[in-house]
Amino acid sequence: MELHNKDAFSEDILPVVIVGNGPSGICLSYLLSGYTPYFSPDGFHPNPILLNKLRENRNLSLFDQDLEYLCEGVEGRSSNPVAVLFDALLLPDGDFGVDCASPLIWRHEPERATPHLVLGKGPPGGAWHAMEGSMLTLSLANWMELPGLKLKDWMRDKRRNLRNDRATPAEIASYYQHYVSKMGLEKSFACGTTVTSVSQASLESGRSVWKIQGLQRRASSGEGIEVPFSVYAENVVLATGTHDIPARLGVDGENLPFVCHSFWELEAAISSGRLDRASEPLLVVGAGLTAADAVLAAHHLNTPVYHAFRRPVSDPALIFNQLPKLLYPEYHKVHQMMSQQQYKVGETVVNLSNQPLSSPADGTSPCTCYPGYLSFPKHHVAAFRPDGKCVLEDERGLQTVLQVSMALVLIGAHPNLSFLPEHGRPLALDSEEPISCRRNPLDVDPYTYECVKEPGMYAMGPLVGENFVRFLKGGALAIVCDIIQKQRKKRQEKCTSSLNFQLTNCTLEA
């Protein structure tokens, strides 16, 4: 869809504009397009309290029910109650690995559709198109799917097989792109768009709306040419994710050429031959899943790896201690490496470049389990030096100096909300700190996802603390329900105003 500059006084104002076309924006577009969930006449749910509540109003769609009432007593692995509710309805007993049928049925009711626009930099699917294509997703395949199209069925049609019930990011990206086409959502998507400003605008009537400005790449305008656009909306939804700006350590030397902050830079180094089995060790900083993927990629290449992270290996908050071993064997392997190949403070650092990359049969190597790897738990980076050295420091202040070929800092990311005043910080729980999914999400109403400090602006997905696709769908439900309530109230006020006008101007006859 090609966008153009709109006149603020043309009254061509959309009810909803969504910034971001990843799974959050796609799911919200699906619900806004008239696809409506109902409790099935023969539906069943393993939670008896929720089941009784659903049976009370079985003729009403989920959009017309009291979400706060339905959320009471439903528990799950999210801090957002509507996310837990919708997940429980789409994937009953999902945490137990049970493939229990959803009690919901979906009906397409075009009369319910709300006109909307979805803006995204790339094709539908968002950041999934940029992720490394061969690694397996953390989530089970059915956790990644969106309502109305089973991921397993789609993969079966593509003659692809799931490994351990998990798919690759490339497959997930392809699924999301197909989903938009399959569900007839394409008319609402404007891809190749970069939003540069979201601000309030006042109409002549005194009504306040959102003005969304940006640039759109158009094939018809020649390669690389971006055309300005502006659109107006009653409500705007932030669904941008949080993968835009890599988090930084803030230490001396972090801007040196050998210090990188994304997995893709590791891939580029491997592809170009700058990193191979003959290289000085790679330093990976971080203890999340992306850091684990980097360790695995380097290990498969037989490149030696130093691995530094702040937490102890046994910390329950460490993601590896929360994953079932059978479902995630590759991450369990990294966790074993982190545990069994630890640097002991006071000992001389093993020179991994001189260490055999295969374990000797007699077990004489000091690191026989996973040669070419050494972990540094409870360490942080103190500085990087121009000569390719990295200074690590433990919790007691003792320092260790490592010679590395490349340092890969993978400690999370921040969203790019540069199109908002102060990069959106005033909308966060702590307006003094940068927005982050885990530590400082946007402050929203838990049952509507409307920003507490900015009425008419909503946020969903990682911006409100939902990193998993299975839970971000609840944000779409909450937002649609609230917008429907607003539209209903607006119609009632309009009818009341019209009736009062007629009564005021009528003439009573004797």
Image (cartoon, grey):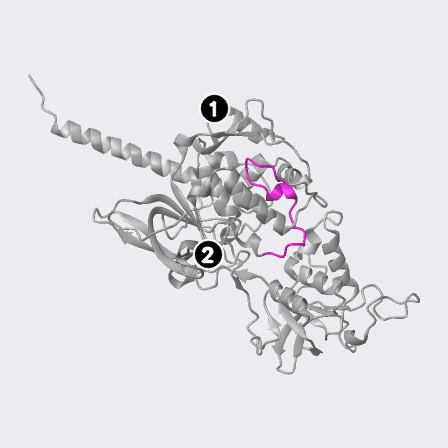
As drawn, the label of residue 215 is none
User: Residue drawn 77% across and 72% down?
Assistant: 344
Q: Secondary structure at mark 2?
A: loop
Q: As shown in the figure, which amino acid type bears the numbered disc 1?
A: Asn
Return the disc, 1 or 2, that comes first in the chain's sequence: 1
Instruction: Out of 315 and 250, give the one closest to the viewer.
Output: 250
Q: Which residues are magenta?
A: 131-151
Residue corresponding to mark 1: 59
Is any part of residue 309 visible from this angle? no
Q: How far apart are the alpha carbons under marks 1 and 2?
A: 38 Å
Q: Quadrant of the C terminus?
A: top left
- At label 1, counting other C-alpha atoms closer than 10 Å, the crowd grade (few under 14, some 14-19, many 20 or more) is few
What secondary structure characterizes most of the magenta part?
Answer: loop
User: Residue drawn 54% across and 41% down?
Assistant: 179
Instruction: Give the image location of residue 29, x and y in percent.
Output: 46, 42
Quadrant hosting residue 373: bottom right
Picture layout, residue 324 above or below residue 288: above
The furthest residue to the left? 510
- Seen in the image, is 489 located left or right of residue 237? left
- Confirm whether the magenta stretch covers residue 137: yes
User: Residue drawn 62% across and 35% down?
Assistant: 92
- Seen in the image, is 228 located left or right of residue 355? left
Instruction: Give the image location of residue 65, x and y in percent.
Output: 45, 31
Instruction: Give the image location of residue 201, x and y in percent.
Output: 28, 53
Mark 1 vs mark 2: in front: 1
- Seen in the image, is 362 located left or right of residue 261? right
Q: As shown in the figure, which amino acid type bears the numbered disc 2?
A: Leu
Residue corresponding to mark 2: 429
